[in-house]
Amino acid sequence: MKLDDIKKLHQKKYRAEFGHFLVEGEHLVLELQKAALHNPLLQRSELYVTSAYEHWQSPFKPHLISDRQMAQIADTKTPQGIVALVPMPATGAPVAAPLAGERAIYLHEIQDPGNLGTILRTLAWFGNFRCLLSPGSVDPYNPKVVRSSMGAIFHAPMELDVGLDSLHTRFQRIACLDMSGEPVQSASFRAFDCYLFGNEARGVPREQLASLKAQPFTIPGCGAIESLNLAATVNMCAYELSR
């Protein structure tokens, strides 16, 4: 791919057009290399480095570029000098079947890249979780999501554009987070297949929650503020489910 096209990958429409996204920095490239050992798609990644990383050990096709060219394709203000060009799964490509005991975390129209990256990092840490993203959610291949995931984007299974109305055909037992309901510490919280979390500002439409017959649970607090951050909420729930 030409450098002029690689620069365009900071925009979602060009990521969709070219079918690639960028991974920047030592840590993320190392996580990519680990994941590529078991993922043939990721093995087709390519590496762009400056002279500082010319001898970087990698299974990917290498390209040596100047510091000026690196500054053009990197998203950060002071790039380290190492960027990977990574192929994205094709639209409609088969998704790996759920593992035994795997739980689904469904995110409805999540908008904040930092929230999604943090959630993916948490799900990868605990393992045995699958992230389902609704239509209208932030692009998981957004550079800010990729960076904040700290490489978890390669380790947490994801499904994109999963309609809210499709959940009842896939999952018999659906839970949601609400201000009212049983506490997440209760034993019954662990009895569900899918856990539904809403948009940072709007949540999930009440009529759709009712049609899904989602069981409400809450994280008890002192009530001094109106709500918890979405990523913090998912993190605490994932911890409870993994205890």
Image (cartoon, rainbow, N blue to C red):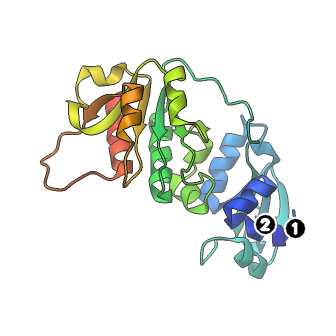
Residue 154, how many percent across, how many down? 62, 44
The answer to whether residue 2 is visible is yes
Left or right for 194, reference 79? left
- Furthest residue in direction front, as rendered: 207
Relative to residue 152, is residue 237 depicted above or below?
above
Q: Which residue is nearer to you in this view: 17 or 169?
A: 169
Q: Which mark is residue 92?
A: none
| Residue type pointed to by label 1 | Lys
* Quadrant of the rendering where the C terminus is positioned: top left
Circles 2 and 1, Cβ within 8 Å, touching? The answer is: yes
Q: Which residue position holds label 1?
A: 2
Which quarter of the rendered picture does the N terminus lie within?
Answer: bottom right
Q: Position of residue 58 (x, y in %)?
A: 77, 52
Q: Residue at x 78, y 64 (%)?
A: 48
Q: Which residue is mark 2?
A: 6
What amino acid type is highlighted by mark number 2?
Ile
Using the rendered image of the protein, determine whether residue 57 is visible from the camera's viewpoint.
Answer: no
Is label 1 in a helix, a strand or a loop? loop
